Amino acid sequence: MPRREIRLTYTQARLLALLVVILSVGFVGFSLATFFILKSRENVKIEIVEIPPAKIEIPIPQEKAEPAKIPEQPREFYRVETYDYAKLVVEATELIERGTKVSTYVLEPSEALGVLRAAKKPFFITELSKDACCISFVGGHAIEGKREYNTLYGVFVLSSTSKDLALERMFALRSAGFPAYLMKFTRDGRDWFTLVVGAFPTSDSAEDFNKNLDWSRVMRISGASKPGYTGRISP
């Protein structure tokens, strides 16, 4: 079979030639690039560096600081005090010297407690009845609107030169509910201590108390050999 000849036009021939040139230049450029890459690898030092794993720090939750404790203030409790004759007898002063200045009053029990707490002074107290009591302040104390007596009488039980013995008998009577105390005086250069029961503004009130006193019980507790008598303590 006869070969078929391919004939190109002038324009086609120029395009084909241009394509061959382009391909040739491209091949030469690729070869040069490959050559330079290979040469550059020879000068490259490859080091394998082990990269440690990243350290991840997990924050540890801190303990919450406890708030400072404020110390509790002591609670104040208010208690209303009521009149307690037996308690006041025990709180009364233990001794008075003969002739000491006094202020003696006759008050109702309901007002006596307030007067005593407000005065804050040594005192004697004797209950005359359920509606009245006698209070005597050692050293004097003025109460507005109340009659003041500057005298003090009592019932004398016994006298001794031994203060300790007299105090012992006095505390024994107080424990039994008697409003007892001591009067100190000096005779012939010696100190004497008289055991007294009751504090009164007048001799009459003291004598009334003496008549109704349970002397058998008083003598048994105090050791007195016979009933006592009314006497003046101040002035």
Image: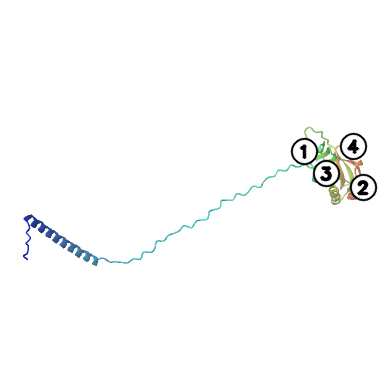
Please identify the quadrant where the N terminus is shown.
bottom left
Neighbor class of circle 2 (other Cα within 10 Å; few <14, some 14-19, many 20+) is few
**For this rendering, which residue is in front, 219 or 196?**
219
Q: Nearer the viewer, mark 2 or mark 4?
A: 2
Query: Which amino acid, by three-letter code, is at mark 3?
Result: Ile
- Residue shown at the point (90%, 50%) measured from the top left: 220
Query: Which amino acid, by three-letter code, is at mark 1?
Result: Val
The image shows residue 233 at horizontal and vertical percentages of 86, 41
Cα separation between marks 2 and 3: 26 Å
Vertical arrangement, residue 101 with respect to residue 4, above or below: above
SS for dot 2: helix
Tell me which label, 1 or 3, sits earlier in the chain. Answer: 3
Label 1 sits on residue: 115
Label 4 sits on residue: 204
Query: Which amino acid, by three-letter code, is at mark 4?
Result: Asp
Label 3 sits on residue: 96
Tell me which label, 2 or 3, sits earlier in the chain. Answer: 3
SS for dot 3: strand
Q: Nearer the viewer, mark 3 or mark 4?
A: 4
Tell me which label, 2 or 1, sits earlier in the chain. Answer: 1
Left or right, residue 75 beside residue 146: left
Cα separation between marks 3 and 4: 21 Å
